[in-house]
Structure formats: structure tokens, C-alpha cells
Amino acid sequence: MGLEKATIERVEDDSDENQIAKWLGETAAVGGETVDEIAQRTGLTQMQVARNLQKLHSDGRATVEDDHWTLATVTQAFDEDEDGT
């Protein structure tokens, strides 16, 4: 039973991470969002948002510039177009 609970908690963490990634994707055109803005939109605490953003950043899925987070894939695609690669 302990294993089931751990699995369920992990799924919930993934859900938070994916929800945050979704918000980042939707706000990429306006320069991303801050931890506080993401927390307000998702209903998560700033600590939960920060933890999940760090996971996304560690996975190479999110970048931060001037405290505004965006999806890394959007930035990478733009950089690749400029380089012609």
C-alpha cells in the first residue's frame, strides 16, 4: 500500500510539472511568467512552482531570464532558425 501511495504522489508531481509547462508554453510570446504569476494561475504555492520549475530546468525543458520562465523548446527553436541549423 505504501508503494501505491508513493506512485500516486509522483503522478501528482508530474501533473503539477505538466501544468506549469503548459502555462509556460502559453506565455512564451509575451516573455514568460514569474514564479508568483505561475502560482496565482495554477493555485500552487510559490514553493511548489519553484520546485517544479527547477525540475523542468534540470530536464532542459525550461529557461529563465530576468526572473521570467519560458519553455526551453521555444527558445531553442528560435536559436536554431537564426543559425540556420
Image (tube, rainbow, N blue to C red):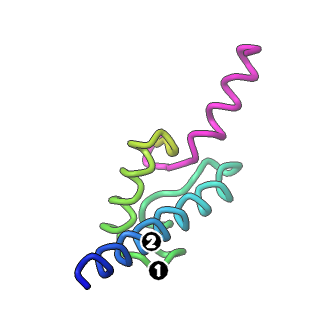
Residue corresponding to mark 2: 39
- Residue 22 within the segment the image draws in magenta: no
* Residue found 54% across the figure and 57% down from its top: 33
* The label number, if any, that marks residue 43 in the structure image: 1
**Is 7 left, or right, of 79 in this rendering?**
left
Q: Quadrant of the N terminus?
A: bottom left
Label 2: how many Cα within 10 Å (few below 14, some 14–19, many 20+): some
Q: Measured from the top left, where is residue 78 in percent x and y?
A: 70, 30
Observer-nearest of 77 and 46: 77
Q: What's the distance in space between the residues labelled 2 and 1, CA to CA? A: 6 Å
Residue placed farthest to the left in the image?
Answer: 2
- Residue 84 within the segment the image draws in magenta: yes
Q: Is residue 76 above or below residue 43?
A: above
SS class of the residue under badge 2? Answer: helix
Name the amino acid type tagged 1.
Answer: Gly
* Residue found 52% across the figure and 44% down from its top: 61
